[in-house]
Image (cartoon, grey):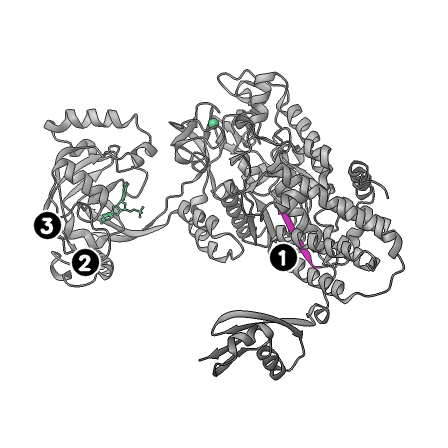
Amino acid sequence: MSNYNFADIESKWQKYWDENKIYEIRNDSPKPKFYDLVMFPYPSGAIHMGHVRNYAIGDVLARYKTMNGFNVLHPIGWDGFGMPAENAAIAKGGHPQDWTFKCIERMTGQIKRLGISYDWSREVTTCKEDYYKWTQWLFLKMFDKGLAYRKKALVNWCPKCETVLANEQAKDGRCWRCDSVIEEKYLEQWFLKITEYADRLLHDIDLLDGWPERVKSMQRNWIGKSKGLQIKFGNIEVFTTRPDTLFGVTYMVLAPEHPLVGQLTTAEQKNEINKFIEKVKHESNLDRQIKTEKEGVFTGSYAINPATQEKIPIWISDYVIMGYGKGAVMAVPTHDQRDFEFAKKYNMPLKVVIDDPASHLNESQMTCAYVDEGVMVNSLQFNGIKSNDAVNEIGEWLIQKGVAEWKTNYKIRDWLISRQRYWGTPIPVVYCEKCGAVPVPEKDLPVKLPYNVEFTGKGKSPLARSDDFINTTCPKCGGPAKREVDTMDTFICSSWYFLRYVTPKDYKKAFDYDELKKFMPVDQYIGGIEHAVLHLLYSRFFTKFLYDEKLIPVNEPFKNLLTQGMVVKDGAKMSKSKGNVVDPDYIIKKYGADTARLFILFASPPESQLEWSDAGVEGCYRFLNRIWRLVTEINQDTRNNNQINSNVQRKLHQTIKGVTEDIERFSYNTVIAKLMELTNILTQDCQTTRPQNLEILLILLSPFAPHMAEELWHQLGHKDSITKQRWPKHDPALIVEDKITIAIQVNGKLRDTIIVPVDMPDEDIKSAAQTSEKTKSHVTGKQIVKIIYIPKKLINIVVK
Ligand code: ANZ
Ligand code: ZN
């Protein structure tokens, strides 16, 4: 017997797969397609266990689908642009490009040592000219359609990253990358009009049956559609989702930035109002929304409620945001909690207009707003109807009066894509004094990112200081012009990379409609939940745009989505700062890639959190050693064995069935448990195990531990690769048990079990049950009232 020398075996087969292009596929294969995609990595320097998990999950699927006769597109590439490369260049000297390519080289080696079945001939790198040329081209397409535009706006600024960020990247007021508190700046920047697609992005979430509910609801909330009514209170318009509360409005609140505040403020109130506005300037929108203590000041003016003709005071407060709705609210303290708190603080009147059917509380009894449905009161002709119906009726009534219109609002904002950084795709625009902002013509793409720039880490970005880059001529008038010095958000690069994998080497176009037809949509996408409203939303937006332009054949990119769980150790996410990182290289060196893969897949189902366990790794290593011994030792004696053990056959076919079903539902951990059981049975049965059985075991194992499976496959005498084998099918006739176990109860209490042949007639089973020794003592001397028989399972004898 030879030892399981994983290091030699793994490098030997990796070389074999590589040299024989085992994992390269053709676009024109006659087989049905399967597009298996993992989120491509950012070349950060080294892969971590999260990557290993992601790629191992994807690899099992790729190998399984291939063996089931699919033409599996299973590519990998690099999300090459981004800030860490530039930051490293600033900190350590060197160049982001050199740093990035060094990282890619190192990580490529690591991924290859994992034995993942990628088609490396399709490798895509977003920071290479032959890729970012097309990213620029896509920008121009959007520009042509008015979907890329420049505007001056209040934007999120990360002081540490020294750049602006998209709203999606500044969630909860912090930078998605470095967690710094975001500042707001008023700047002129480039945006993509994702809002134009808001409704379709929302609506089509319903088509995504293969996506986790959690991701779908995160996207729904982010888009934040709300239907409501825009009502004129004189010349002030408000947006409300609750027209049913109109008769309960007792004051109005404007955002401090509202354009009418100046003219509404009376002389007496001027001082206080200005002081308040000054104060609010220092609060971010986010602070204002989460602040518990609402503050405000009276303007001195009044508005007229169009329903009641009552005079209501107009206030300003920080809880009303200028960027949402109309920047003004009709306040209903009895039915809106924020308004309730504000009214209590400033002694504003309360008026109930929806009666709480459970408590009928009046104004003075209320301790909080009543926000649910009820019966309309104090609302003139609307009294007595359900508040739910009143939404529409009051709405229509106001529309008739000409003071309102239905309006849909969205929370999502246009995607700010300018970045004041060097290491990104240059925005292909020049500024000419005569012609203004002029897009670079397609034939002049790519606008190359210059290599020779200076990284100081202070002040302007390297591009903004590179005269060679900046100074150019206007494509329109030929006069002197200056290039845009901002680069694009790298999330643009990753919004279309899955299209490039289909024709990665096409120098003439970004992608090809007909070729995409063969592979899109992605059948299975696998990645982290952190991209729920970043990459996954942006990619859907790009896909819809390209579909509208008739450039691609699908309008949703990803049919099924699996969000893998985190890898944790000692209960915490692996991270350098916590000092609990387990280095994949170390595990591969010590146990081999097959053990690493197997452990990662065995320790928990893909979507759950995975707790690292050294003992678990050891266990997987021992399991692989058992298979090694089983095949290398036992096989010597049984090479020509043709005897069939029906118990072993049954177990084998049950395992084929179970493993296949489990793989189909991503229950990889239970697959491995089943393979362990089968291995035990085959080992016990070592005298009679036939080589055919071992072959099936190896095929079932191959998606999980491909190197060992390939090696032992060849040791069994095969000359071709195990990856070329067909996935086995179970024989339904063989999995049927020939004996069954019947439970015997007396008055519902289990007293005995008997094992009988499956084909024993029911009458015989019933009499066998009554004659069982253990049952007898509970039955003798008593009267049998009835016998309940659940066929092939259970007999219950009821006695008196
Ligand atoms: C009156 C009212 C009565 C409201 C009531 C709610 C309950 P969503 O669902 O998020 O769209 N609102 C409108 N514009 C606002 C702004 N710029 N800043 C802060 N709040 C604003 O929320 C819509 C509701 O949020 C609107 O409906 C309005 O308050 C408030 F019993 O109008 B409501
Ligand atoms: Zn930052």
Q: Quadrant of ligand 1?
A: top left
Q: Secondary structure at mark 2?
A: loop
Name above or below for residue 554 compared with residue 277: below
- The image shows residue 60 at horizontal and vertical percentages of 67, 49
545 sits to left or right of 128: left
Amino acid on which disc 3 is placed: Gln
Q: Residue furthest right?
A: 640
Left or right: residue 436 versus residue 136 is: left
SS class, disc 1: helix
Which quadrant holds the C terminus?
A: bottom left
Name the residue that disc number 3 marks: 309
What is the crowding at mark 2: few (fewer than 14 residues within 10 Å), some, or many (at least 20)?
A: few
Q: Is residue 125 above or below residue 762?
A: above
- Indicate the amino acid at tag 1: Asp
In the image, which is nearer the foreground, mark 3 or mark 2?
Answer: 2
Rendered image: mark on residue 358:
2
Residue 258's disc number:
none
